[in-house]
Image: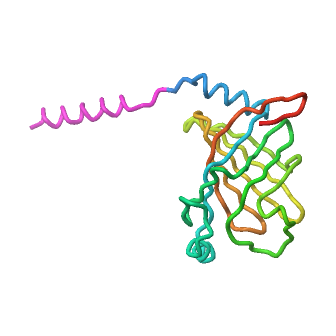
Amino acid sequence: MRAVVFLLMLGGFLIGCSSAKKPVEPTAQSEALEALIAKKSFNIQSDWMYPLATSSMNTIANSGLLPPGSTVNGISLIGNPNYIKFHGDSISMDLPFYGERQLPGQFTRNEGGIVFSGVPDSYEVVKDEKRQRHMIKFTVKNNRESYRVMVTLYPNWTSNININSSHRTSIRYRGDVSTLKKDNGLVTN
């Protein structure tokens, strides 16, 4: 009986020692992404938007106003132009918005979404070695509204964008990262 208990303990000890994770070597793809983040020269285009599910959003979904293939929990952005561009110290973003307005504000006829172009108030990049991702946190102000944005970039060049607004419900986007191309001195995507 003692031999069986000893063998079980020894087996558990050996299994516990073998489960220690070895550091993962960076791939060429993740190194290229890291270089883009360091240069602050890349674009994110989102394919899906995930608004906060509220009773107003359910009303919109029930009225048939959502794009085809979309639900109140996930709205397809395929075919809708949207972006966040990082170019040097400046950030440009134009993202559609579905959700509720929390405080009164002004929309121009062409700006119902989240729009900003300029230098952010704060900017921070955090590298999470354990989960192999980069998190870019920044805050911006547009007119009277301010946004806290957290962009998470993964080694396979995908992204998650979480936006908290001072005037709207929070929203999340999922998309892909690409490089910015230069055309006659102008940065384009």
Query: Which region is colored magenta?
Result: 1-22
In the image shown, does 57 or 183 lie closer to the viewer?
183
Q: Which of 121 and 77 is in front in this view?
A: 77
Residue most extreme to the left: 1
Would you identify the image quadrant in which residue 8 lies? Answer: top left
**Residue at 75% from the left image edge and 56% from the top image edge:** 148
Q: Looking at this view, is 13 or 158 the one in front?
A: 158
- Judged left or right of residue 108, residue 27 is left
Query: Residue at image x 58%, y 34%?
Result: 156
Q: How far across and how far down the image is residue 50, in percent?
A: 60, 59
**Which quarter of the rendering shows the C terminus?**
top right
| Image height of 46 relative to 187, above or below | below
Residue 4, magenta (yes or no): yes
Give the camera-side residue of 92 and 30.
92
Q: How far across and how far down the image is residue 181, in percent?
A: 79, 30
User: Does 169 appear above or below 41?
Assistant: below
The residue at 81%/56% (across/down) is 115
Image-quadrant location for residue 26: top right
Q: Which secondary structure dominates the residues rendered in magenta?
A: helix
Horizontally, residue 164 falls left or right of residue 116, namely left
Q: As drawn, is 117 to the left or to the right of 157?
A: right
Q: How far across and down, in percent of the image, does residue 18 sit?
A: 36, 28
| Picture residue at 78% right of the left edge, 42% below the top | 85
Q: Is residue 101 above or below residue 32?
A: below
